Image (tube, grey):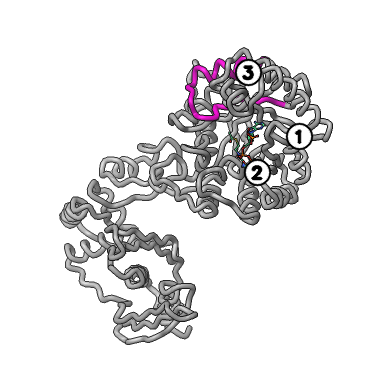
């Protein structure tokens, strides 16, 4: 915690999160979640301790209502809600899903009142009061969101939200629907609404101000922050749950979520939505706790707080050292130690120079690259444990099959396998040939097309883990199956190479 005296959010403030990944997050173009995926994400959100889960928009259709009902059936501690437009029919559809509450979204700016919904300010007030009464009469928890609130006349927004509270709404929400405003106007609007009753904040990231506006809203009195996992959402996205949670915890000492659940949640949402985690994003990005440059690596090895604002374990992650153009001797020494390789000071300096040279050529430097360089520099010629001799894979028939020939400690082994595709089939053949020697977890598998056309060279990068030791290998080939198998076999070779116990035979 880094609080300074002028800060406006006291550590004893109660602030909760409303997650709308299943509603606003799903509105991101191309994203559609099945009922099972919504259930899995809702469970993750519950573990992360969010107060409200907006499970969808019941008005969207029967499939969406089924998905929302599956979430309400979970009987979570979190309140489960549905989005509703300003119409009774939408509230009725939400009631069909047995939700705990609704977000009634009513137009707030003149653009939305007149241009979109085609009504007048007066009519909008009357309709809002009627809808809130209708929803509360049905025992629903009600939040009224003034859509496009940041572009609304603030006097009218205040009148509209006051009307909603007078009619019985539990809370109102200031919505920067198009991510148009900044912290000052957010604070002004929220502080006016907070005078009327409990108020939430709904911010978007079109200007990259999503977190700043959410924090500003909290400092002005908001006690519920709308957000989505990984910042998914319309256009540039909603404010990211993980960013709000860590910012409030780290800067203000205000706890809103089980922080150690955040990375797991991010990965689940990424898998379900097919939206990859950007490498450079706070909390969730691959690079968030990875150090490559020599000065940072050296500093981090001396004191792990040197170049990190908080420990990666806080958000369920681990620190990683990477190799590349900017690597220095400290990083090389640490990585070699991890792999049990000894080198003297001169050798380490030479290895570091060659790693930098490899990086200069635009290459990402993997563990396997480092180990090969180290062998060359130290003259430690290692016998390979496993080597790929031959590979045949077919995907034309009903069942993709592959056969493989490996040299294992000098002996030839042949095996075949089937799988969901040629890569999967070839990997099962490798596992078949190696038996328990292949007992290593495939931690990650990435494919990148190096060139753009159908004749592209692909680079496959795998990370495999055995007995707490991990090795990353990259292989580039025109054939994706060959690149995958070579990378995997090389990784296993590296992992097995350091095993001290005798290698087990294939049929063990
Ligand atoms: C800021 C936000 O995130 S808003 C939420 C966006 N979410 C969604 O759009 C949910 C997914 N949407 C849908 O499934 C569909 O759009 C539906 C089922 C809601 C409506 O479908 P349709 O009836 O075909 O209408 P369509 O999508 O073309 O237009 C939206 C209608 O909602 C009306 N509407 C929009 N906002 C509101 C509001 N706050 N209150 C009342 N009516 C509204 C529009 O005026 C328009 O009505 P009109 O056709 O009478 O002009």
Residues at marks 2 and 3, CA–CA distance in whole angstroms: 25 Å
Q: Secondary structure at mark 1?
A: helix
The reply to whether the C-beta atoms of the residues labelled 1 and 2 are less than 8 Å apart is: no
User: In the figure, residue 455 lies in which quadrant?
Assistant: bottom left
Of callouts 3 and 1, which one flags the residue occurring earlier in the amino acid sequence? 1
- Magenta residues? 171-195
The reply to whether the C-beta atoms of the residues labelled 2 and 3 are less than 8 Å apart is: no
Residue 164 lies left or right of residue 484; in this view the side is right
Q: Secondary structure at mark 2?
A: strand
Q: Position of residue 309 (x, y in %)?
A: 42, 35
Residue 5 lies left or right of residue 162; in this view the side is left
Magenta run includes residue 172: yes
> Which residue is the site of mark 3?
157
Q: Position of residue 129 (x, y in %)?
A: 76, 23
Q: Which residue lies at the image location 64% right of the left edge and 26% below the top edge?
A: 118
> Which residue is the site of mark 1?
88
Q: Secondary structure at mark 3?
A: helix
Q: Nearer the viewer, residue 233 or 125?
A: 125
Of callouts 1 and 2, which one flags the residue occurring earlier in the amino acid sequence? 2
Q: Position of residue 485 (x, y in %)?
A: 36, 72
Ligand 1 sits in quadrant: top right
Q: Which mark is residue 56?
A: 2
Residues at marks 1 and 2, CA–CA distance in whole angstroms: 17 Å
| Image height of 351 relative to 188, above or below | below
Magenta run includes residue 277: no
């Amino acid at each position: 915690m880094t609080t300074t005296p002028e800060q406006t959010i006291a550590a004893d403030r109660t602030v909760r999160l409303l997650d709308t990944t299943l509603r606003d997050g799903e509105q991101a173009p191309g994203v559609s979640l099945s009922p099972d995926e919504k259930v899995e994400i809702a469970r993750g959100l519950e573990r992360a301790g969010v107060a409200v889960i907006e499970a969808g928009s019941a008005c969207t259709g029967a499939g969406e209502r089924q998905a929302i009902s599956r979430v309400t059936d979970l009987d979570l501690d979190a309140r489960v809600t549905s989005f509703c437009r300003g119409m009774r029919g939408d509230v009725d559809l939400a009631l069909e899903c047995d939700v705990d509450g609704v977000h009634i979204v009513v137009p707030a700016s003149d653009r939305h009142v007149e241009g979109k919904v085609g009504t007048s300010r007066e009519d909008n007030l009357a309709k809002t009061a009627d809808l809130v009464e209708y929803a509360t009469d049905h025992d629903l928890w009600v939040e009224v969101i003034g859509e496009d609130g940041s572009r609304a006349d603030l006097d009218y927004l205040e009148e509209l939200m006051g009307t909603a509270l007078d009619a019985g709404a539990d809370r109102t929400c200031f919505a920067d629907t198009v991510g148009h405003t900044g912290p000052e106007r957010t604070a002004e609007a929220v502080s006016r609404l907070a005078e009327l009753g409990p108020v939430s904040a709904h911010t978007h990231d079109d200007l990259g101000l999503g977190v700043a506006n959410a924090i500003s809203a909290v400092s002005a009195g908001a006690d519920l922050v709308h957000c989505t996992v990984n910042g998914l959402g319309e256009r540039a996205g909603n404010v990211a749950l993980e960013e709000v949670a860590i910012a409030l915890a780290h800067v203000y000492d205000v706890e809103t979520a089980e922080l150690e659940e955040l990375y797991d949640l991010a990965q689940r949402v990424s898998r379900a939505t097919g939206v990859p985690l950007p490498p450079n994003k706070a909390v969730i990005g691959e690079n968030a706790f990875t150090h490559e440059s020599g000065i940072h690596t050296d500093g981090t090895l001396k004191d792990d707080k040197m170049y990190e604002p908080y420990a990666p374990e806080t958000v369920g992650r681990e620190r990683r050292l990477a190799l590349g153009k900017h690597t220095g001797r400290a990083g090389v020494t640490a990585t070699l130690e991890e792999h049990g390789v000894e080198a003297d000071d001169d050798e380490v300096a030479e290895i570091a120079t060659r790693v930098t040279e490899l990086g200069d050529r635009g290459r990402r430097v993997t563990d396997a690259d480092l180990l090969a360089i180290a062998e060359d520099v130290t003259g430690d010629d290692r016998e390979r444990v496993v080597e790929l001799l031959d590979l045949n894979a077919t995907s034309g028939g009903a069942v993709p099959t592959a056969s493989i020939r490996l040299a294992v400690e000098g002996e030839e082994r042949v095996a075949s396998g089937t799988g969901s595709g040629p890569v999967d089939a070839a990997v099962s053949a490798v596992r078949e040939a190696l038996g328990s020697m292949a007992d290593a977890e495939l931690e990650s598998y990435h494919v990148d097309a190096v060139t753009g056309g159908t004749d592209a060279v692909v680079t496959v990068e795998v990370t495999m883990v055995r007995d707490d030791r991990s090795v990353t290998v990259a292989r580039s080939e025109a054939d994706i199956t060959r690149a995958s198998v070579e990378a995997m076999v090389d990784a296993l070779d590296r992992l097995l190479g350091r095993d001290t116990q005798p290698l087990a035979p294939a049929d063990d």
